[in-house]
Image: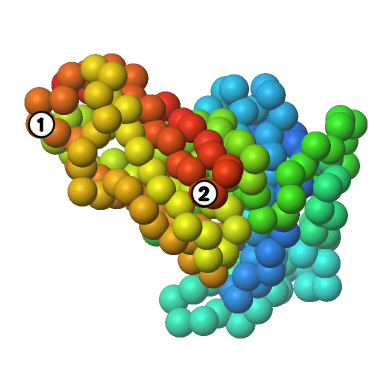
Amino acid sequence: MTTHLAARRSRPFHADLKTCLTVSGAVTEVRAEDDGDSHVYLALDPPGATSLKLSSLLLEIVPADKPGCTPGQPPRPASGSYDYGHCTGADENDPAVGSHVTVTGPYVYDQDHRWNEIHPVWAISASSGVATAPAPTAVSPTPTGNANPTPPPAVSKGVTIVSLSSPVKAGAYANLVARTSPGAACTMSVTLPSGRQSQSSGLGPATTDGSGQVTWSWRTGTTTRGGIATGTVTCGSASATGTFQISG
């Protein structure tokens, strides 16, 4: 794989998981961020979804790789300690929602937001495949609260579980983040490896925010038996289920 040699914006809050990763999938949403990055949400094709244990992945196209900047020059003036690097001349355009693309770049863990992503995108191009993207608001990576998050591929009728802490040690906290329509009334339950329903105070009803995101944080009991637990999110008539490992 080849990479751009020009200097890029520093990534002080990113931990490298894989130096170079190539995945493909359908673009479900594209957002312009205040810092100039484009957030591209990708519903992964089966090979990537299986190997990464993710149903969706965030891609970030940075200003240094976008059209309109002068190669070798900063795409934007530095903002405090925030360095945008230097324009690479890659001229990477944002993909269209619904298109099927192949993307290459470093696979990293964003320690600030606590999710995995490809950042920055080194190359993105249209590829063959069936674009089966859900509605633009259906998929979005979100914080997991775990240094090695393992979100399950759980999408069901408009509710997406986009991150779920795993493994979780008995007595420790776990996080689940889901996304559906903004302002939706949702509830979450956990079935423990023993088959019993968790009675943790962090579970139960919650309402999604303006972006459709909702987060639950709960503590597993110190005597909880190890094994596979199941988290279920229900928002109206829609629901999604993901599994996670509890270790003793």
* Badge number at residue 222: 1
* Badge number at residue 146: none
Closer-to-camera residue (83/140): 140
Closer-to-camera residue (195/6): 195
Tell me residue 157's x, y (percent): 65, 40
Q: What element carries label 2?
A: strand
Rendering quarter of residue 12 = bottom left
For badge 2, the amino acid type reads Cys
Tell me residue 110's x, y (percent): 45, 52
For marks 1 and 2 on the same chain, the one whose residue lies earlier in the sequence: 1
Query: Which scheme is used to colour this image of the protein?
Result: rainbow
Closer-to-camera residue (86/54): 54
**Residues at marks 1 and 2 touching, judged by CB atoms closer than 8 Å:** no
The answer, for residue 3, to whether it is visible in the render is no
Q: How crowded is mark 1: few (under 14 residues within 10 Å), some or many (20 or more)?
A: few
Residue drawn at x 16%, y 25% as measured from the top left: 224
* Badge number at residue 235: 2
Front label number (1 vs 2)? 2
Residue drawn at x 21%, y 42% as measured from the top left: 200
From this view, report whether residue 163 is shown above or below residue 128.
Answer: below
Residue drawn at x 45%, y 52% as measured from the top left: 186
Q: Residues within 10 Å of mark 2 (few under 14, many from 20)?
A: many
